Amino acid sequence: VYAVGHRKLPLRGRLFAAQLAAGDGAFLSHRTAAADRKLRPNYDLNRIELTVPADRTPKKRRGLVVHRTTTPIDRAEARPHNGLLVATVPRILVDSAAAEPPREIQRLITEAVHRQVFDATAVQAAIDRHAHRPGIRVLRAAFARYDPAATDRKSDLERSFQRYQRSDRNLPVPEYNTYEGPWEIDVAWRAQMVALELDGRPYHIAVQDFDKDRRKDRALTIAGWTVVRVSDFEWEWARAEVIADLYAILGLSSSRARVGARPPGR
């Protein structure tokens, strides 16, 4: 691939050249596709990732990372986007699940929801289509926290936290579902004025719910509370960090925290 008459290609030119270099059927994928669809903050032009059909073996070129796929490339997998063929959001999530940590998969889903490019039906279809791909278990877990059919996520999280609290004798006993004015607090340590909000989903799809939480946080802060929000995803995958942070916020010695503890019957 040659650029004629230009010493310095713009971003789209670099990406277009990479796609041409990878050959027919190639599409931007993985982190590059996530950046192109605004799910990541920037591109790494020293590592442009593309996917090609399994029967293609492009020549190795510096700066290009080529993945191969046996899945037929159709509109469920890649679509034109700003003049380039780019992995769809569901395909980006499937690819990322095999290479990224769980919290990054949840972040990608959250960002897709915020940008209104998240289609739950399409994501479920992608999970089913790639059922045996590495990382699909992580993607299923992350997707389950968005699934509109799930109605008891917060209750499950509250019960899990209560089981942990009972197992940790060093953690002060809080009040549950108590009120500060009109606002209900999930878990409250009044002596320390710490309010823990357990979010059954790590984001809210409805704008009014998101705004209500922000108003609640401001009102509690004005009343003197320190507000801490923990999602069920954090509680499952980063519990040690959550507990350590709670100990610090409550003014407890970190050496007393049973940060590795997981309650029975999770």
Image: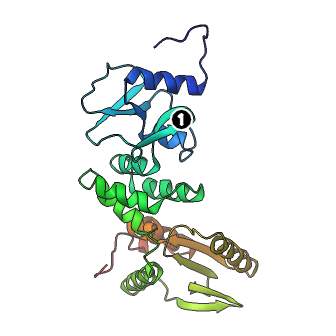
Residue found 72% across the figure and 75% down from its top: 215
Report which quarter residue 160 is drawn in.
bottom left
| In this rendering, position of residue 42 left or right of residue 152 | right
Disc 1 marks which amino acid?
Tyr
* Of 2 and 265, the residue lying toward us: 2
Residue found 43% across the figure and 75% down from its top: 149
Report which quarter residue 120 is drawn in.
bottom left
* Of 179 and 100, the residue lying toward us: 100
Q: Residue furthest right?
A: 222
Position of residue 132 measured from the top left corner of the image (x, y, whole percent): 23, 53
Figure quadrant of the N terminus: top left
Q: Which residue is mark 1?
A: 43
Position of residue 212 measured from the top left corner of the image (x, y, whole percent): 68, 76
Residue found 61% across the figure and 11% down from its top: 6
| In this rendering, position of residue 87 left or right of residue 59 | right
Q: In the displayed structure, would residue 44 be above or below residue 229?
A: above
Local packing at callout 1 (Cα closer than 10 Å; few below 14, some 14-19, many 20+) is some
Q: In the displayed structure, would residue 84 be above or below residue 261?
A: above
Q: Secondary structure at mark 1?
A: loop
Position of residue 144 measured from the top left corner of the image (x, y, whole percent): 40, 68
